[in-house]
Amino acid sequence: MEKFCFQKTAWFINIVIVIIVITSSLVIYYWRWKTERRAKGQKARLPSGTLGWPIIGETLDFISCAYSPSPESFMEKRCRLYGKVFKSHLFGGPAIVSTSAEVSRVVLQSDTRSFVPWYPKSLTELMGKSSILLINGNLQRRVHGLVGSFFKSSQLKSQITRDMQSYVETSMNSWRDGQLVFIQKEAKSIIFQILVRGLIGLEPGKEMQFLKSQFHEFIAGLMSLPIKLPGSRLYRSLKAKKKMASLIQKIIQEKRQRNASKRSCNAQDAIDVLMEYSDDELTDDLISDNMIDLMIPAEDSVPVLVTLATKYLSECPLALKQLEEENMQLKKQKEDSGEPLEWTDYMSLSFTQHVITETLRLGNIITGIMRKAVRDVEIKGHLIPKGWCMFVYFRSIHLDNEIYDDPYKFNPWRWKERETSTSTFMPFGGGQRLCPGIDLARLEAAIFLHHLVTTFSWVAESDQIINFPTVIRLCSAQTSKYMDEFHVPTGSNLVDDDFDENKFLMIMPCL
Ligand code: HEM
């Protein structure tokens, strides 16, 4: 009897599965047929390409290429077959992929009448609806403008320069002969504290430590399954975000009380700037959520930039030599005059800036951005149907041999003759959402490199670059302090979760 019941249940489950598969396939084919028919009625053409398998589309192929040393191979294969703009089906939906500089520029310049930001579900859950990355229209322009002008202010740049110099010196002074130093770990720790101070005015201490630990918990869920059940990765990250938000809300309240007793207040950090303009739209919740989002580049993008620059320089002795000479010259000049180094000094080092620019091009810290079309959009004869995702893939543009000679070669000198403000170079995006942290990222990287190359020499160990889900670099090197003539092996690793110290200790060569 029991056996009979079991057979009946299994039979029933099989029928349900078959019905689900048939129905979903029919729905998908109907939807594809409708889109293609709609496209036939338009002047612009739906780009060629394939939507791959039902439901998963081409996502698996994309991810397997993304984990490989050349993530752009997914695009290259399709560009050869269909051209620089092609259709695909990625991360659960149909997509148009652009590896064309011209088309990408138009997408970045478009406003919310054509495209709105698109991110994976786990990311939108964690960011929240009020995140600067997700808000649109007037509110986005307002927050972007306020935060952007504060980031560009010489007051913040001077403060960041002072803090960064002192933290970098403290950190580098602790590097000892025979000790492995992980550049990315060091850079993360320094840059996080500096940026957090610039954002919310928090000084190093217990609260900073708490924020750091909660932030690690939060950021771990950015690329997780969108399941919000207790114990799941996303759930734990959301809990960490809540704890961070209440700490920031407390800081906001304290600032309010302090400011109430003053007539006017000079903005010391990004919270001050936003609080000054707070209203029904710019609420305390929105401010605290955005402060957390703004910590992401501090934890991720800038340390990756610094680590990659160290790696590329290690592989290009000529560039390293020229960088050392330029920075040594500045150091000596300042020592002779007895003046401190200002942010303008770092930004005026032309070869150092070329090194940073070339690292951004070759390293592709942000490989691309995604948007969703809110109506049928036509760009240069290509149709992007309403509801489709538009994936602008910077990496293919930055590694295109029609645009850059020998694109896989680290060649900072190419920027002597080239402009960075063109549609063929877009590591910071463009248009209304152009990264407001450009200057800060360049400044922080320049300060780190200045202190590194004027204090140490090093020999790099073998390393590995992991490009997905975020760019991860593993590299290690051996250094010698110029002045004291002792050497310090250094290494770098980008993500603590993947961090395997033993691996580095084992392969560490000693001069
Ligand atoms: C190497 C370092 C960095 C890189 C490569 C980078 C890259 C980018 C890119 C490509 C975008 C455009 C996103 C889009 O169009 O959807 C962006 C936006 C943004 N970045 Fe950065 N970024 C870096 C550093 C920073 C820093 C240091 C900050 C500030 C602390 C920052 C704050 C932002 C903000 C707030 C946005 C959103 C702007 C908006 O949507 O209105 N970034 N970044």
Image (cartoon, rainbow, N blue to C red):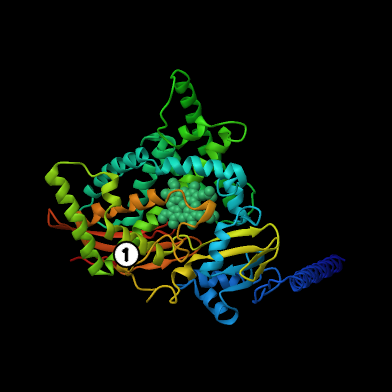
Q: Is residue 191 depicted above or below 76 in this figure?
A: above
User: Residue at position x 38%, y 73% from top?
Assistant: 408
Q: Is residue 146 toward the left or the right of residue 420 in the image?
A: right
* Quadrant of the frame with the C terminus: bottom left
State the image coordinates of residue 435 (x, y, percent, origin top left).
47, 52
Alpha-carbon neighbours of circle 1 within 10 Å: few (<14), some, or many (≥20)?
many
State the image coordinates of residue 267 (x, y, percent, origin top left).
42, 32
Out of 68 and 281, give the one closest to the viewer: 281
State the image coordinates of residue 57 (x, y, percent, origin top left).
66, 71
Asked whether mark 1 and ligand 1 are closer than 8 Å, the reply comes as: no
Asked where in the image residue 466 lies, by quadrant, the reply is bottom left
User: Residue at position x 44%, y 42% from top?
Assistant: 149
Q: Is residue 220 visible?
A: no
State the image coordinates of residue 304 (x, y, percent, origin top left).
39, 57
User: Residue at position x 57%, y 51% from top?
Assistant: 233
Q: Residue furthest bottom?
A: 81
Q: Is residue 393 toward the left or the right of residue 310 in the image?
A: right
Look at mark 1 in the image and give the residue it sits on. Answer: 311
Out of 313 and 427, give the one closest to the viewer: 427
Count of numbered badges drawn on the protein:
1
Label 1: which secondary element: helix
Asked where in the image residue 417 lies, by quadrant, the reply is bottom left
* Quadrant of the frame with the N terminus: bottom right
Callout 1, which amino acid?
A: Lys
Q: Is residue 203 depicted above or below 454 in this figure?
A: above
Q: Is residue 279 depicted above or below 464 in this figure?
A: above
